[in-house]
Image (spheres, rainbow, N blue to C red):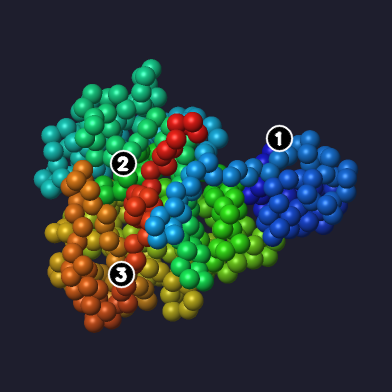
Amino acid sequence: MMNIFGMTFEQLGQLCADEGMPKFAAKQICDWLYAKHVDSIDAMTNLSLKARARLNEIAFIGRHAPVDCQISTDGTKKYLFRIENGERRMENYPDAEANSQFSTPNSQFSIPNSQFSIPNSQFSTPNSQFSTPNSQFPTLNSQFSTPNSQFSTPNSQFSTPNSQFPILNSQLNKYVEAVFIPDGDRGTLCVSCQIGCKMGCRFCVTGQQGFHGSLDTSEILNQIFSIPEFDRLTNIVYMGMGEPMDNLDNVLRSTQVLTAPWGLGWSPHRITVSTVGIIPGLRRFLDESQCHVAVSLHNPFAAERLNIMPMQKAYPIANVVALLRQYDWSGQRRISFEYTMFKGLNDDTHHAAELVRLLKGLYCRVNLIRFHSSPDTPFKTASSQAMERFKDYLNSHGITCTIRASRGEDIMAACGLLAGQAKHSSKQ
Ligand code: SF4
């Protein structure tokens, strides 16, 4: 049985040809799947009975309602989606650890004299963050290697009551989250593209989970099509769990369904895709898509950025900005930079001055994001005054800057807090 939800017009055309259906059937199926968003083949009433019977034999529509929803006092809703066979995704990555950026002796994560370097920490061992017994984070495979628990590594932060992120549980790799953010006439949905994430950003709950597999096109789109607010959506942002440029085929195909005339027919400018700046993926995305791009910047100084974003080593932010300068941003397509503000780490005027220098002459905007601190994380929230000062500095030096309103903090739905956690054991 094949899942036809998420297929493109071309793919459905091939299917129809293979099954002896008329050419126009592909257009009809697209219309039912996307414009009318039905979730049953029997509902496709302008297909012949014979065609529907055949489709029911060989295909299904992979739509699944969320298994949980948490509602914030500000109206933000966080939906939890179960990913079928999510726990087996790593079988698709048999060499993940061997080939991983995390596993070489000269790992990009070995940062001498890092301000965050602690004995046996992720950043201080020759074999990198994911490989030592006392590592802050267990190995990608260690969770599958013990009979009782994925987080049973001695001294692992995940196994103690005082864990930095105690919200994780043994089912985390079966779930992803999407966040619906209502704002007047706007309805924005933040979607996930991976289960966990490889990028390891130190301030991000998702990043601390490690990587558990990528979503396919259907699973990305299901987050959009299967929430009750589907008809209220005006914008989609790919800023949930995972790095879009690390799952680019599926991300591009999903945006194709959203924007193509045979799909939802949305303007690509209603869609923003975020990235830490994986240059090969970003270059391809810029060439093949017209969607907006948001780059997670967070610190303009290379050494300081490396301390919080390991991918800085492979793809320095200066190189990312140099790539972006090769494209025209003076039209409707937009580039924005996300800048989460941490007290004492990136909120000083000299950071703002360096940011101005880095982005000078580039049509762009900077969004300042309030960090959500907790007693368990070394990162602290920058003060409102520091954020205002930073914003004013950028605006007065020719860079459009806004402080992004924080939404859904009370349900862990705000930026960097998505964990894909199943709340209720009955649903696991
Ligand atoms: S901030 Fe984004 S890229 Fe970084 S670890 Fe979190 S989900 Fe991954």
| x and y, in percent, of residue 96 in the image | 40, 34
The three-letter amino acid code for the residue at tag 1 is Met
Q: Is mark 2 within 8 Å of ligand 1?
A: yes
**Res 159 visible:** yes
**Where does the N terminus fall, quadrant-wise?**
top right
The three-letter amino acid code for the residue at tag 2 is Gln
**How far apart in space, not on screen, are marks 2 and 1 (Cα)?**
35 Å
Residue marked by disc 3: 403
Q: Is residue 68 above or below residue 269?
A: above
Q: Which residue: 58% across, 54% down?
A: 228
| x and y, in percent, of residue 421 in the image | 41, 39
Which callout, 2 or 1, points at the residue further toward the start of the chain?
1
**Res 212 visible:** no
**How far apart in space, not on screen, are marks 3 and 2 (Cα)?**
26 Å
Which sits in the foreground, 354 or 393?
A: 393
Q: Quadrant of residue 53?
A: top right
**How far apart in space, not on screen, are marks 3 and 1 (Cα)?**
48 Å
Residue marked by disc 1: 1
Which sits in the foreground, 330 or 70?
A: 70
In this rendering, would 13 be left or right of 73?
right
Q: Which mark is residue 208?
A: 2
Q: Which mark is residue 184?
A: none
Q: Which residue: 44% across, 71% down?
A: 334
Q: Residue furthest top?
A: 147
